[in-house]
Amino acid sequence: MHPGPFPPQRQPWEAQPPPPPAAHGGTTRILAFGCLGLILLTALGTAAAVFVFGSKLAGSSLASTPLTPGARTSLTFTDPGKGSTGVWLDVDVAHTQGFRVMGMFTATANGRVLGQYNLNGDLSGRCTNPVIGQNSSACVNWRFTQVGANGTVSGRTRLFEIPAQPSGTAVSVIGTLYLNTGVTPRRVALDARD
């Protein structure tokens, strides 16, 4: 019994034990969903970057002309004045002895030469730039197959860049493309893209 109207006071050493810790199942789920969200966001960001940079690399076509191997070809377009213009080789060929391109193209604007480009390159496999002296290559939808000596190649490879011209400038690319023996062209074209 205790004297007085108040309940008895407990001594500090008689205090109640602390409550048990809360279950961690909720925290684990939150961390799992957060990690899953970051992985999904990274995948979507990568896909968007590939789409944006891939389409930017390819640009939109300003002009295109089919190439007949061994025949002189001319591609003329009006420069939109947005920056440099890429000249691409668009191919879809079958081959029995590899796929090599040779030739020369000259780019002119208003009668002045912008550049002269000599081609001599093997395009049988991976993406390469066949222009002599050009070390960088850029390809779009480049695909190749090889079974023994036979194979196929399709896609676009950028040959060279034409420097930016004032808007409305007529630009011409003239030249001849040669293919090695054993190549059956299904499509070979010269394409100017901004």
Image (cartoon, helix red, strand yellow):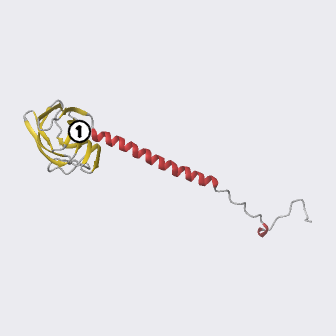
View extreme (left): residue: 111
Give whichever of 152, 57 is nearer the camera: 152
View extreme (bottom): residue: 13
At horizontal 26% and vertical 44% (from top left) the residue drawn is 152
Vertical position of residue 149 compared to residue 67: above or below: below
Give whichever of 148, 13 is nearer the camera: 148
Q: Position of residue 149 (x, y in %)?
A: 24, 50
Quarter of the figure with the N terminus: bottom right
Kindly identify the amino acid type of the residue bearing the numbered disc 1.
Asp
At horizontal 14% and vertical 51% (from top left) the residue drawn is 133
57 with respect to 38 (left or right):
left
Residue 90's image quarter? Answer: top left
Q: Position of residue 52 (x, y in %)?
A: 34, 41
Give whichever of 43, 147 is nearer the camera: 147
Pointer 1 local density, CA inside 10 Å: few below 14, some 14–19, many at least 20: many
According to the image, label 1 marks what residue?
90
Q: Position of residue 153 (x, y in %)?
A: 26, 44
Q: Do we see residue 87 in this rendering?
A: no
Q: Do we see residue 20 in this rendering?
A: yes
Quarter of the figure with the C terminus: top left
Q: Which structural element holds mark 1?
A: strand
All told, the count of numbered labels is 1
Q: Position of residue 27 (x, y in %)?
A: 60, 54
16 with respect to 168 (left or right):
right
Residue 68's image quarter? Answer: top left
Give whichever of 60, 145 is nearer the camera: 145
